[in-house]
Image: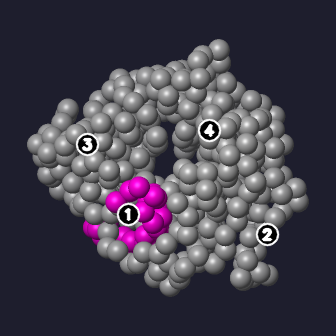
Amino acid sequence: MRGRNLWPLLIAGSVGAMGVQAALADDYQLLVGSYTAGQSQGIYRLNFDSSTGQINARPLQVVQSENPSWLTVSKDQRYLFVVNENGPGQKDPVGRVSSYAIDSKTHELSLINQVQSLGNEPTHSSLSGDGRHLFVSNYSVAEDPGGTLAVLPVGAEGKLENVEQMSSHPASRVNPERQMSAHVHSTVSSPDGRYVFSNDLGADKVFVYLFDPKANPDLPLTPATPASVQLPPGSGPRHLLFSADGKHVWLTMEMSAQVAVFDYQNGKLEQTQLVDLAAGQPASDKAAAALHASADGKFLYVSNRGTANQLLVFAIDPATGHLKELQRRSVEGDHPREFSLDPSGKFVLIANQKSNQVVVVERDAKTGLLGKTVQKLPMDAPSDLKFLLRQ
């Protein structure tokens, strides 16, 4: 499906698409990363109207880049870091990471530099709390050489330096098709920046590191105590999210389609709940992916791909972080790799990778429930969505 030439359709128009217009009070800019095996050119910068939930079909900017599948915006919104999820057999067989400057007035992107990730198919990145290191997760589809965690210093004016540290983990080997080697899927820092958590789908573990670049400038990550959190065999951990107060953690497990809930304190995770997204359903329904919480911390949203292709809505217990299911809603497409709540909180945007579309759905901020679909925007193989806030 990636081979379909959908971008001319996007330019010509879409459901509810608007013409070019001046930026208004309700306008935000949206960055869309994508896979480029088909017609996509890379990163698209678009206008989003939060009063109507409409994405303007005509791009403000198209940045040519190979497989920019994950986008990381710095806290001050001055820089954008992009993983180029390349690997053997692709047009560019080398995994890379790119840095862009974001213009403070127009949000126009301009390339600063690009370096190798020293691994295949880098699939995720995140910044350290001080913004001076980028943690890149090299997933590596192939068993050999397997996945790795790469640490890249971020220099002055957003320039990426070469990888200064690599870490790898032994695989669980539970699933002979997907877990014969490490597959690092994402890596995130604790709210205080002292610890780093690396989720390895191939190992069925979350690996925990102490982050102290001042004490160890050449090796800023050192194993914490304990150095890992064991998860159910064959579960395949994917993405991890801290609660707003930093007391709880939610983790999607891709292969078992579950969400694990933890209490968190000083680098230690203690599991308190395990939630099934596809209980009693066939294996084809089990492909958990992204998770995001509402800005008020009351609701958690989780995508499940496979043949389920749903967004699940949970109420969050503020005392325990435990989840109560409220709703299951079709994403009206295939393979919701990522999604994003818009800055107003009134809409959810879903990147349906395999059906080549971004779907916009209404959201009730009071109940957390998802409502009607307001737009289906054709776009080839979208993979990530990030908003740029007004300065």
User: Which residue lies at the image location 55% right of the left edge and 38% below the top edge?
Assistant: 289
Q: Secondary structure at mark 3?
A: loop
- The kind of residue on which mark 1 rests is Asp
Q: Nearer the viewer, residue 75 or 42?
A: 42
User: Which residue lies at the image location 72% right of the left edge and 83% below the top edge?
Assistant: 217
**Residue 222, label in figure:** 2
Residue behind mark 1: 92
Q: Secondary structure at mark 4?
A: loop
C-alpha separation, residue under disc 4 versus residue under disc 2? 30 Å
- The kind of residue on which mark 3 rests is Gly
Q: Secondary structure at mark 1?
A: loop
Q: Are marks 4 and 2 in contact (CB under 8 Å)?
A: no
Q: Is residue 99 one of those drawn in magenta?
A: yes
C-alpha separation, residue under disc 3 versus residue under disc 1? 17 Å
C-alpha separation, residue under disc 1 versus residue under disc 4? 25 Å
Quadrant hosting residue 102: bottom left
Residue range of the region highlighted in magenta in the rendering: 83-108
Q: Nearer the viewer, residue 116 or 59?
A: 116
**Residue 177, label in figure:** 4
- The kind of residue on which mark 4 rests is Glu
Q: Do we see residue 53 in this rendering?
A: no
Residue 348 in picture, x, y percent from top left: 42, 37
Q: Is residue 370 left or right of residue 238?
A: left
Of circles 1 and 4, which is in front?
4
Q: Do we see residue 41 in this rendering?
A: yes
Q: Earlier in the sequence, mark 3 or mark 2?
A: 3
Residue behind mark 3: 3
Label 2 Cα crowd, 10 Å radius (few <14 / some 14-19 / many 20+): some
**Residue 199, label in figure:** none
Q: Is residue 151 left or right of residue 339?
A: right
